[in-house]
Amino acid sequence: MIKVAINGINGKMGKVLSAAVRNQEDMELVCGFDIFDDGNNGCPVYKAPKDCPEKLDVVIDFSHPALFEGVVEYGLSTKTPLVIATTGLSPEQKEKMVEASKEIAVFHSANMSLGVNLLIDLVKQAAQVLYGNFDIEIIEKHHNQKIDAPSGTALMIADEISDSLSDSMQYVYDRHSVRKKREKAEIGIHAVRGGTIVGEHEVLFAGKDEMISITHTATSKEIFATGGVRAARFIASKTCGYYSMKDVISNQ
C-alpha cells in the first residue's frame, strides 16, 4: 500500500486529488498539509509538512510556490519522494528541486495531464518540420481565479519547442508595447483569463496561406488528479532522481 500525503489538501485541486487517491486500491491517503482544516477530510491535516509524524511513501503538491520550501525540506529530511505539480515556481525553486533530486526522488511537471504531454510531443515534431516557414504562437486560457500568467504549461510547451530547434528562441508576451514586425525566432505567448475555464492550450503554426493548430482542452480538474496519482505510483519506489511525465509515458 502506497502511503500518500497531499500538500494543499483543502484547495480546489487538493479536494479533487483526495478523491482520486481514495479511489486507488493500492493507495492510502494518510494525511494532508494545509493551514485550513474544516475537519471533513477523513484524515489528519497538519499546518506544515514538518508537523507530520506519520511515515509516508510520497507527498503530492498541487499548492502554491510559497509552500514549496517546506515540502522540499520535509522530503529531504525524511527521504520521502515528492510529486511537484505547483506552477509559478521561480528559477531558484526549480534549481532547488534539481539539487534535491540528488538525494531523493522528485517528479516535476507543470501539467499532469497525459494529453498535454502528448500534445508537447506532437508540437515538437511539428516545429522541427515547420519552423522557418511558419510562425509559432501559444494561446492559453484559464479561469478568472488563476493567479500566474502565462500558465506554467504554456511556458513548458514553449521551452520544449525551443529545445527542439537549433535557433535561440525569444518569448514575446505583450506585442502592443513593441511596434515592429515579428521576428522569425519568436514564440508568442498569450494568456486569457475568464469565467470557469479549466484549461485550454493551443499551439498555432501560421504560415503563408495556411495555419495548423494543435489544441488540448481540459473540461475538469480530474485529469490532473489522475496524472498526479499516476506520478505518485511511478515515483514511490524510486530512491533518487529527477523525473517528469516523459518517464511515465515511456513506461506505458
Image: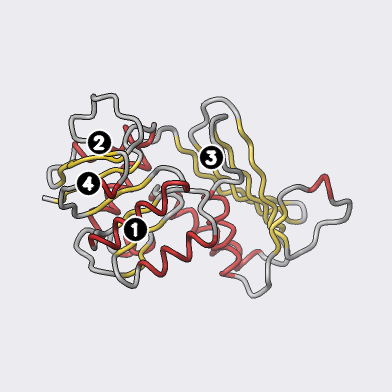
Q: Which residue lies most toward the front here?
A: 51
Mark sitting earlier along the chain (3/2)? 2
Which structural element holds mark 2? strand
Q: Nearer the viewer, mark 4 or mark 3?
A: 4
Which structural element holds mark 1? helix
Q: Position of residue 214 (x, y in %)?
A: 56, 49
Is residue 71 shown left or right of residue 56?
right
The residue indicated by pointer 1 is 73
Identity of the residue drawn at 56% across and 46% down: 151
Question: In the rendered structure, are the residues bearing label 4 and label 3 in contact, judged by CB atoms less than 8 Å apart?
Answer: no
Identity of the residue drawn at 60% across and 50% down: 203
The residue indicated by pointer 4 is 52
The residue indicated by pointer 3 is 200
Mark 1 burial class by Cα count in 10 Å: few <14, some 14-19, many 20+: some
Q: Position of residue 96 (x, y in %)?
A: 44, 64
Mark 3 burial class by Cα count in 10 Å: few <14, some 14-19, many 20+: some
| Circle 3: residue type | Glu
Q: Nearer the viewer, mark 1 or mark 3?
A: 1
| Circle 4: residue type | Cys
